[in-house]
Image (tube, rainbow, N blue to C red):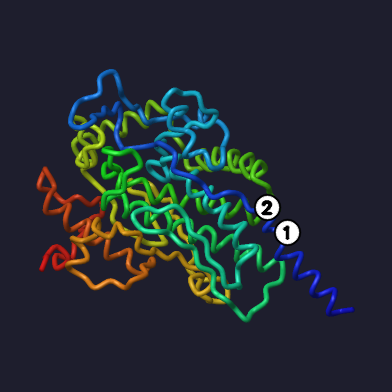
């Protein structure tokens, strides 16, 4: 009888979360290249009567809608969405891109539901391609987890892998990722506020899930919307007029108002620093963010679940790097620093102002990665 009871409890713990697993987030929210009153061009031809302001007030954020990215391009541009995004300047965390916050929060929620079902068991799923096929791979473990420990580990691992997905997205953008033909994403790659905003989303979503592990999608949306607004206020979010002023003060330093989207060099400064502890790129800001790479018993999260990047016949995008370093067939976050260093080195050589492209003080690129055979 004890065996039957144990078996039933195990099956319930595994099967119940599976029924609640949502569809993966599709696409990304259409925001925000760094700058203000940005203009665009298509095939080198300026688009008249089009500009992007990019700034927002905390009071105007609206609700949070999971999985909105693929549906929101037209509604966002027309101002019809109930969810609104933009850049917000905060005194304690510098610039925050709320679209990046929300995107990583959604992936954290999605991966949390998967982790509840799969953590400790051999399994994998494949996400839509971003120059490489993105696979989440769970590894078999001999350790059994009680329900409380499963929730804690599932939330920690979800935030960690969701942030790695964000890191890869920045890399893919730099190497040529496009969502709209002819409109590449390089003007947003490694933007100074991006990954900090992603990590903020991972942390906030993790906290929501630890406190509300049974939350369905609608409940998560509601709780997260309130928490995001509260957190931005704690970070001393400023009115949109101040955000606009701060952005304009960085014109010619971080961005070039004379260039049009999707010109890569609209963005003059980037943050190539890939780490699990991040400082804001604002000298007076003090709010440090971090993600744990291990569980409380020092077991590495990646020994349980891992992001893998598999060739999808688009490796030609990476040829300049692949000529300089030997890479394994399957890429993981262990190689991410090579991509970032290469990008930093190439941008240093190509920068139109002949200045360092990095916001990092005293940053130095590894010049050997620039050399081709």
**Residue where numbered disc 1 is placed:** 16
Is 171 on the left-hand or right-hand side of 115?
Answer: left
Rendering coords of residue 185 (x, y %): 30, 43
Q: Quadrant of residue 330?
A: bottom left
Rendering coords of residue 58 (x, y %): 50, 32
Question: Which numbered tag is attached to residue 205?
Answer: none
Cα–Cα gap, marks 2 and 1:
7 Å
| Residue at the image point whose x is 11% and y is 43% from the top | 353
Q: Quadrant of residue 345?
A: bottom left
| Residue at the image point whose x is 46% and y is 23% from the top | 79
Between 208 and 125, the one lying in front of the other is: 125
Q: Secondary structure at mark 1?
A: helix
Between 328 and 289, the one lying in front of the other is: 328
Is 258 on the left-hand or right-hand side of 22?
Answer: left
Disc 2 crowd rating (10 Å Cα; few below 14, some 14-19, many 20+) is some
Between 280 and 6, the one lying in front of the other is: 6
Is 101 on the left-hand or right-hand side of 213?
Answer: left
Rendering coords of residue 282 (x, y %): 33, 46
Q: How many marks?
A: 2
**Residue where numbered disc 2 is placed:** 20
Q: Are marks 2 and 1 in contact (CB under 8 Å)?
A: yes
Rendering coords of residue 136 (x, y %): 49, 63
Is 79 on the left-hand or right-hand side of 279?
Answer: right
Q: Secondary structure at mark 2?
A: loop
Q: Is the residue 274 above or below the residue 106 in the image?
A: below
**Which quarter shows the C terminus?**
bottom left
């Amino acid at each position: 009888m004890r065996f039957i009871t144990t078996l039933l409890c195990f099956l319930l713990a595994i099967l119940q979360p599976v029924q609640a697993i949502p569809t993966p987030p599709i696409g990304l929210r259409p925001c925000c290249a760094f700058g203000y009153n940005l203009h665009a061009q298509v095939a080198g031809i300026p688009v008249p009567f089009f500009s992007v302001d990019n700034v927002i007030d905390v009071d105007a954020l609206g609700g949070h809608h999971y999985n909105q990215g693929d549906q929101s391009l037209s509604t966002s541009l027309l101002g019809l969405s109930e969810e609104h995004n933009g850049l917000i300047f905060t005194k304690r965390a510098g610039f925050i891109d709320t679209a990046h916050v929300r995107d990583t929060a959604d992936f954290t929620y999605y991966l949390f539901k998967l982790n509840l079902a799969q953590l400790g068991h051999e399994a994998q799923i494949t996400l839509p391609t971003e120059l490489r096929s993105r696979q989440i791979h769970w590894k078999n473990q001999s350790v059994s987890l009680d329900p409380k420990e499963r929730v804690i580990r599932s939330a920690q691992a979800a935030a960690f892998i969701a942030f790695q997905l964000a890191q890869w997205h920045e890399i893919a953008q730099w190497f040529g990722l496009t969502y709209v033909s002819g409109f590449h994403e390089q003007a947003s790659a490694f933007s100074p506020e991006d990954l900090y905003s992603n990590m903020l989303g991972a942390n906030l979503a993790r906290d929501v899930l630890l406190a509300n592990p049974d939350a369905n999608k609608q409940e998560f949306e509601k709780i997260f919307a309130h928490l995001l607004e509260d957190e931005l206020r704690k970070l001393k979010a400023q009115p949109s007029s101040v955000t606009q002023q701060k952005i304009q003060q960085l014109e010619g330093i971080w961005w070039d108002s004379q260039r049009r989207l999707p010109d890569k060099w609209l963005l003059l400064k980037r943050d190539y620093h890939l780490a699990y502890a991040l400082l804001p790129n604002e000298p007076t800001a003090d709010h440090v963010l971090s993600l744990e790479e291990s569980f409380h018993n020092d077991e590495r999260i990646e020994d349980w679940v891992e992001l893998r990047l598999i060739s999808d016949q688009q490796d030609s995008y990476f040829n300049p790097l692949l000529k300089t370093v030997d890479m394994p067939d399957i890429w993981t976050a262990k190689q991410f620093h090579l991509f970032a260093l290469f990008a930093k080195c190439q941008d240093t050589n190509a920068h139109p102002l002949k200045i360092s492209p990095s916001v990092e003080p005293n940053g130095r690129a590894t010049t050997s990665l620039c050399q081709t055979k």
